[in-house]
Structure formats: C-alpha cells, structure tokens
Amino acid sequence: MIKTLLTSTFVVAMTAQVAFAGSDPEFTTYNLDVTVGSTIHILDYVNANGQSLGGDFYFAYDDGESWHLSDFNANTAVPLINADLDGGNHGPGEYRIYMMDAHDPDSSLDHMTIRVTGSNGAVPDAPQTIELTGIVRDFKISHPDMQYPNKSFGVKTNLVDATLDAGSKPVLRTDLDPHRGMIDGPDSFNQWFRDVPEVNISIPYPIILQLAQDGSGVYSYAREKQLTGDLKYFFPIDGMGWNDSQSTSTGTHNFYFTYEIHTEFSYSDPSDRDYEMIFSFTGDDDVWVFINGILAVDIGGVHGQATRSINLDNAAAQLGLQPGGTYTLDFFFAERHTTESNFRIETTLQLIEVPPTTISPLYD
C-alpha cells in the first residue's frame, strides 16, 4: 500500500493490490489529483504478499517526453514544485510517477498517475492580477439619456441587438420601444460609446482584477456599496471631464458616464481543466457583455444592483467557442442616474486587454 500525505493535512490511501510476476511488476495505475506545491510523502510500499519493501526509494516523473529523477528518498516529504533535480516541477499536466530502487535506477516496482493543477487547484499558471484599461466617456446631465425624466426603473433586457456592429459597438433595437429602458432613441444611444465633441469627453481608465487566494481561480474587481472607504461605489471620474456632479445621499459625484473595455481570452477544453469558465457582473446601471461578438450578459436599463452570469462551457455552442480558439469579450457599462453606482466583475477567464484608443470613431 502507498500512502500519500498532502499539505492540506489529509491522508489519501492508495489501496489497490499490486501483483508481481517474478521480478517484474504488473503495473497498477493510481490516480491522484494534487496541486503544485503539494507534498507527497511515501510512508511505505507493500508488495502483493504483504511484505514491506521499505528502504531507499526514489520517484521519477515521466511527462511523456523525458524522465525526471526526483531528489528524495523514502520517508522524505518533498513539495512537487521542488521535486526535479533540474530545478522544479514542470508545471500543470499529467505525470506518471514510478517507484524504483535507489540503487538500481533501471528498476520499476510500480507507478501511479497524478494530475498536477495550478496552485491550490486554481487556473494553471494564473497571474495574480489582470489589468484592463477601458475608456470612460463623461456626459453632462443635459444629455437626453442621463437622469431621464420619464421614469421606468428596473432591469430591461433586449434593449440592444444580439450582435455588435462592424465597429464592435452595441446597437439599440428599434423594433422595441427604447423608452422602456429610459433611452431617448438611436441618435442619443449612438453617442454612448463613441467620441462626440461637445457631448462627451473620453478618459482612459484602468481596473485591476485580483486573483482570489481561496483556490477558486476567480478574478474580481469590485467597487460597491457593500464595501468601505475608497472601495465603496464606482465613481472613476469624480472631478474630471465635465464634472457635472450631483450631491445625493451617497455624496457628491460625477454620475453620468459610460465605460467600455475590449479584451480577448483563450477557450480551452473543459476536460483539460478543473474549473468552469464563467463571467459574472453585479451592479448598475446598463451592462452588456458580448463574447465572440454575441450578447452573453444583458442587464439593460436604469436599476439597482443586479447580477447576471454566463457559463461559457454551457453556452459554448451558442457562442461559437471551440477549444484552442481565441475570442473577444467586449464589455459595455453605463451609469445614468443617481444615487448609486455599483460595479463588480468576477471571472475565471484570463482576460487579455485589447489596447483601447482614445480616438474612437466619431458619432455620425
């Protein structure tokens, strides 16, 4: 029996019988999921007759291309990340680990297969932060769609087309009444995410998504009422742009702006990872997220905090995603009414910024 002790303090016992034919083993594969930095501790090794082999044993990795003799003996606990003589673990993947006599490197007593994932089970090789720079466009309160006079509060879906236009901008639907979303019409809406002299002012604005330290692989950025200090609410351009501020119960803020971010990500086969690819937003007001140019998150309208999510694995066919492909994720946000502005992104996608330009196509 092989027993393995992981750094998470629980013991996994490998109890399958190992049969020997003469001096050659009949290999039995043991499957064990571990994480980079975990510790495997060999307590004992028992043959089919119950005899303890004990003694001086090594492990070796076989990653499908080469062998990597480990640097530890029986009864020695060594983190996987340090287990190679040539300088450390070879990263996430499947490894076949062989038991061998330290005094006979050609021997093979038995083996097991381990699957190594990223640190604490997170996304393999995940960076600790992701910085994305988008464009904030500041508007005046006099804009027809800001502080709209005829109130129709609440989440309103289907305000925009299911696909982006040729300029990668959302298109207001004209077959449904836009006033239900507190939008004057196509002319005013087409100014939201385009530079329009005397109407809006463009300001680049970065956000930094932080990787959770709980092993979930989730990146998040949050500025919302549940937080405190500088993290409370999302007002990225106070004192900037037109600075057409309003004083409310949440303070004096520049409420009237839009924000767009353009990114890319790689889609992988779900069977090759131990997490789901998700994107979630919580906040107000309008938010539209397009994946591969297709509307995936729809939280239109002037409303309080609302949450919508998309599981890309479940929606892969609908979104046209194929393993190994690189796809766009385009994010559009609008803050159009007092008194709050909440903004939370949570995702397991390793987003890559598509650099914005401060000179976008002008409103026509």
Image (cartoon, grey):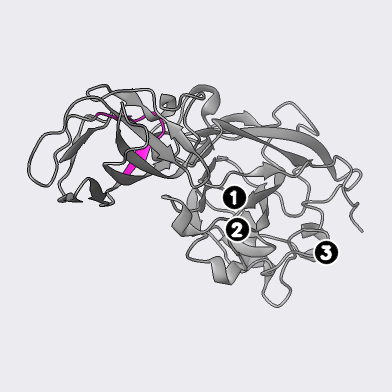
Residue 273 sits inside the magenta stretch: no
Q: Residue at x 53, y 28 (%)?
A: 231
Q: Which residue occupies 15% across, 41% down?
A: 1
Identify the magenta region. Answer: 32-41
Q: Residues within 10 Å of mark 3 (few under 14, many from 20)?
A: few
Give the label on residue 301, or none: 2
Amino acid type of the residue tagged 1 in the rendering: Asp
Query: In front: 99, or 121?
Result: 99
- Residue type at mark 3 is Ala
Mark 3 / mark 2, whichever is N-terminal:
3
Nearest-to-viewer mark from 3 and 2: 3
Element type at mark 1: loop
For residue 99, side relative to residue 331 (left or right): left
State the image coordinates of residue 322 (x, y, percent, origin top left): 60, 64
Residue 285's label in the rendered image is 1
| Tags 1 and 2 touching, CB below 8 Å | yes
User: What amino acid is labelled 2 in the image?
Assistant: Gly
Q: Is 33 positioned to the left or the right of 336 in the image?
A: left
**Label whose residue precedes the other's in the sequence (1 or 2):** 1
Q: From the image, which quarter does the C terminus lie in?
A: bottom right
* Residue 223 in the image, given as x and y percentages of width and height: 54, 34
Disc 3 to disc 2, C-alpha distance: 24 Å
